[in-house]
Amino acid sequence: MKIAVYPGSFDPVTNGHLNIIERAARLFDEVIVCVMVNSEKRPMFSLEERKRFLTRVTAHLPNVKVDAHAGLLAEYAQQHHCCTIIKGLRAGSDFEKEFQMAMINRNLNPNLESLFLTAEHQYMYLSSSAVKELGGYGADVSEFLPPEIVADFQERTRNIRNHKEALP
Ligand code: PNS
């Protein structure tokens, strides 16, 4: 059984992420989408909230599981018998960083392959950071997010704008 892990911050999951998940689910027997910590980012949603969003938007994919892990990706992959790390690759900007992470993960676990799926052209410049920036100004972001999470996203950005809620 071929199991892949698709790690990321998913803060929050976008239509671009979902497109990668759906394509990966056609390539592997099982795909684990794992919410992880990126030490360079300060998230808007907690690990548990991001996991809940992903569970909701992948409910139609029977071979996709959602998990969260605050440790090393290479260790997680080994513990969960994943042979491959899936990553989405957008326009040029992703390449350097992704290449470096792939090298580090392979060094930590030589049996682990990183497989890059190129973003569909309509998602080439879509990122969670851009969606959060737009949402921070109250812009309509519904075309970038799965419909199941739009209301929650809007509520959080509205509360942050009105200082009713702090970042986790
Ligand atoms: O969506 P992101 O922020 O680009 O995802 C990056 C992520 C979370 C996959 C990466 O930061 C990660 O693998 N974090 C877990 C800790 C780890 O294994 N770090 C070593 C790889 S450099």
Image (cartoon, rainbow, N blue to C red):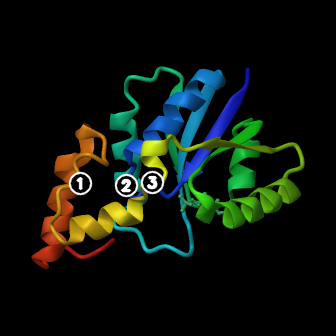
CA separation in Å, label 2 and label 1: 12 Å
- Which residue is drawn at the image coordinates 50% and 29% (left, top)? 22
Q: How many marks?
A: 3
Query: For residue 86, which numbered disc appears in the image?
Result: none
Of badges 1 and 3, the one in the foreground is 1
CA separation in Å, label 3 and label 2: 5 Å
Residue designated by label 1: 141
Secondary structure state at the residue bearing disc 3: loop
> As shown in the figure, which amino acid type bears the numbered disc 3?
Phe
Residue designated by label 3: 10
- Which residue is drawn at the image coordinates 53% and 38% (left, top)? 20
CA separation in Å, label 1 and label 3: 16 Å
Query: Are the residues tagged 3 and 2 within 8 Å (C-beta)?
Result: yes
> As shown in the figure, which amino acid type bears the numbered disc 2?
Pro
Secondary structure state at the residue bearing disc 1: loop
Secondary structure state at the residue bearing disc 2: loop
